[in-house]
Amino acid sequence: MEGRARVDEESGELSLSPSDNHRYLVQHTTPALRFSGGDVAAWQEQLRPKLRELLGMPEPSAFPLRARTLWRSELELGTVEKVVFAAEPHADVVAYFCVPYDRPAPHPTVICLQGHSTGMHVSIARERDDESAPFEVEGDRDFALGALRHGFAALCIEQRSFGLRREQTQSAVSPHGCHDAAMQALMLGRTLVGERVFDVDRGIDYLAARGDVDLSRLGVMGNSGGGTATIYAAAVLDRVRFAMPSCAFCTYADSIMSIYHCADNYLPGLLRWAEAADVLGLFAPKPLVVVAGRDDAIFPLTGVRRAYDDLRTIYAASGAGQQCRLVIGDGGHRFYEKQAWQALLDVLR
Ligand SMILES: [Zn+2]
């Protein structure tokens, strides 16, 4: 980049795009808590509280869950309950809890997070506003059915700004639906993704209260915006035992700092402290499957490989080089159930 700056001076070319300056800064910034070898656990103890601070997550509170079941029904592969619990004042979380037929409790369980979509109903392949009607799911995004097919229970959380939790009380909203909430969160010293991670934590409270979930085999998975929440949840929530983020893990330099993404992908100040590999490196040595698409245009494979190489270094330094896998699907920005679950069962073994 220095070479290019000189060329610019010589040629007299003007840098008028704000992103030109930002890319220059990204190239010339070394995050202060990048992993640089040594004791992984000691490094994690420094970075994790900083990341929690940058996420601006709500403080853990004794606010009552007030969990209740709205209805129960049956799917081809198991039972499903629609449930609701309170994350914090005026923030109710709706979710589906699915259990495979003929499997004894306590159940290994995966929390499933959709990305920018019509919501959690995609995970059970039923229509959002009429769950008795089938919904055609593309790109293996029927995460709960994938979990049931592999003998796992699933808690499909509706994330803030998506699906049933899309903005409905404000008169006008951005096309993506997340922009307004993401910006308002910043004014409160929060981030929307931090609030989503908080909801996952409350989802774990809910699962713990149920009594039929094996908390030693509890994971989080999701694609795209759901993958992003998965990564941050894995990084800061102790109770997450395995993670499978899809089409969300890539160097920040190659993805959200180079390609248009909406506002809920950004954490103020994060690049002063860490790159993506460091964030997910907070999960080492726990079982991890990173899923990517060969032709994913918004999380490009070159950046995924760059980030994964650094992540592997952290896992290897923590003595768990075999506990993380990279699955590359032969397609775009989507999930790849067969390969991903095969890798997950392998690292969980
Ligand atoms: Zn968004």
Image (spheres, rainbow, N blue to C red):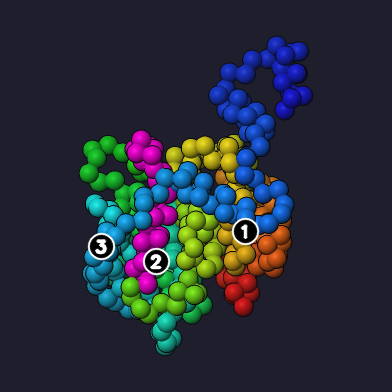
Please state which amino acid type lies under the numbered disc 2: Ile
The location of residue 336, given as percent across then percent down, is 57, 64
Name the residue at 44% across, 60% down.
Answer: 113
User: Magenta region, mostly helix, strand or loop?
Assistant: helix
x 57%, y 60%: residue: 283
Note whether residue 119 is visible.
Answer: no
Under mark 1, the amino acid is Ala
The C terminus - image quarter:
bottom right
Q: Is residue 3 magenta?
A: no
- Tell me, for residue 41, which label it has, or none: 1
Q: CA distance from mark 3 to mark 2?
A: 14 Å
Nearer the observer, disc 3 or disc 2? 3
Q: Quadrant of residue 337?
A: bottom right
Query: Where is mark 2, residue-wise?
Result: 204
Q: Residue at x 57, y 54 (%)?
A: 45
Location of the N terminus by quadrant is top right
Name the residue that disc number 3 marks. Answer: 64
Residue 204 magenta-highlighted? yes
Q: Is residue 91 left or right of residue 283?
A: left
Helix, strand or loop at mark 3? loop
Residue at left 68%, top 66%?
A: 320
* Residue closest to the eye, 19 or 218: 218
Mark 3 burial class by Cα count in 10 Å: few <14, some 14-19, many 20+: few
- In the image, is the residue at mark 2 within 8 Å of ligand 1 by its beta carbon? no
Under circle 2, the secondary element is helix
State how far apart marks 3 and 1 are (Cα).
33 Å
From the top left corner, tell me how far across and down residue 224 is, in percent: 50, 53
- The amino acid on which the numbered mark 3 sits, given as a three-letter code, is Pro
Numbered tag placed on residue 202 in the rendering: none
Cβ atoms at labels 2 and 1 below 8 Å apart: no
Which stretch is magenta? 183-208
Against 239, residue 56 (above or below) is above
